[in-house]
Image (cartoon, rainbow, N blue to C red):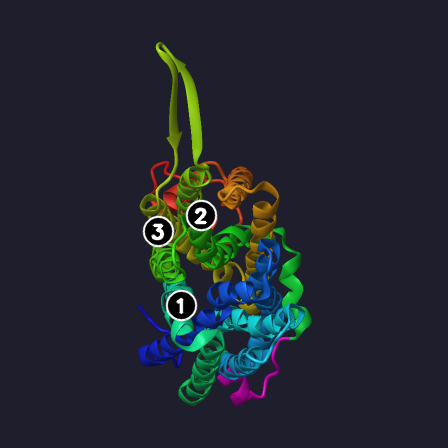
Amino acid sequence: MHTLDGVTRTDQHRALGLSTFAFTVCFAVWTIFSIIGVKIKMELGLSDTQFGLLVATPVLTGSVSRIFLGVWTEQFGGRIMFPLQMIITAVAVWLLTSVQTYEIFLLAALGLGLAGGSFIVGVAYVSQWFEKERQGTALGIFGAGNVGAAVTNFAAPFLVVAMGWEGTARVYAIVLAITAVLFYILAKDDPAQASRKRTGAKAVSAAEQLAPLKDIQVWRFATYYFFVFGAFVALASFLPRYYVGAYGLELTTAGVFAGLYSLPGSVFRALGGWMSDKWGARWVMYVTFFVSLACLFVMSYPETNYTVQGINGPITFSFGIGVTFFVGLTVILGFVMSLGKAAVYKHIPVYYPHHVGSVGGLVGMIGGLGGFVLPIAFGLLLDYTGVWTAPYMLMFVLVAVSTVWMHIAIRQMEKRRHPVLDQEKFLSDVPEQPLPKPETAATRAATGSAGEPVR
């Protein structure tokens, strides 16, 4: 296995390690409202809808910012954009502690949300260091920085108890600023940026970077990411509130249980990248969607009392999901969602190797918008239905629609391929190829084939 010209394994490991660590810190900051938001909700007396909007607002900034952060990273390099994004976010987190009203909290949350834009900066930076056959694994390892959500769910409740939510925010701001400085000192310019500096070549313009966005296939990838990432972020923020309200748990216990969902939803992304490299992203996406449907069907079932007319009179029994079983379902759901996140981003460097920033930015933006829209929808559903499991019903419908849409798209793609080609493994992972010319006696004689189809 060869590396890119002028790039050593040490260079690759340095870029991947620094980017993954920085992304982990950024993601922990991005989801901080899932914990401190509970305290803010109590202090301000917010409704579930208002709380959902507060939790979702950082996701909005983190999502929308990805499109232009991706373009800028392609132009100026990740070594510049990553620290710059982290410093600006650290300032916003620090200023959050001086806020008093709900409206200003929403404004401050917009600045904090810039932490979520770090994902596409890292994708554009890391993908430059690795050859195509290893990009899925590398980006999967980088994406495991989603574990920052688990760090927040595990650690932040205890910081809130010890220091209050204001002290917790200050700690996060300081750690983020230190990470920014260390990244700038230790990281190197990516190969493309270094080449431009040597040759004086100009970076690709923003218009050229955005050109692939008119391809419907880009939007299809974005739709998948709306669930596997957007719903992951939404559920990571919603679960502490759910455990406190539905099961009456303490905030610290609720945070730990939510962390059990976030942890496999993050660390196994590297496994998803490896599986996508080996068996194809299409297969991984099918596994993700089918298992998610099964988990969400059970999770969405509300506690219900039944009465049937028996031989000797009415018989009453109930069905409900205990907290232990529910936590187990969230662990499984988080695991398959982590595989799906890696599978989606396996496609992008293969289809669009020179537009990773813009295409990945759009996909990440649409996925991140799921993390903005869904918490608000969860709050509305709770306020208007009064059923704790209603958010999981919404997620079930979302996955069902995505599964059908993906399957139809793949079947249509297969019909455009030559019927004798082996199209079952990497069908959705490689760009469209021209059909082979019909085999003739001359070509069979030249290749020594015995009627086998040309591969």
Q: Please provide the residue range marked out in magenta.
A: 193-204
Which mark is first along the chain, 1 or 3?
1
User: Is 309 placed above or below 319 here?
Assistant: above
What residue do we see at 49% from left, 43% from top? 389
Which mark is first along the chain, 3 or 2?
2
Q: Which residue is tagged 3?
A: 331
Q: As shown in the figure, which amino acid type bears the numbered disc 3? A: Val
Q: Position of residue 131 (x, y in %)?
A: 40, 68
Q: Position of residue 159 (x, y in %)?
A: 39, 74
Q: Which residue is tagged 2?
A: 246
Tell me if mark 3 has few (under 14), some (14-19) or many (20+) residues whose alpha carbon lies within 10 angstroms of its own.
Answer: many
Task: Determine if the magenta segment contains residue 199.
Answer: yes
User: Is 168 placed above or below 332 here?
Assistant: below
Q: Which residue is tagged 1?
A: 157
Mark-to-mark CA distance, 1 and 2: 19 Å
Give residue 409's quadrant in the image.
top right
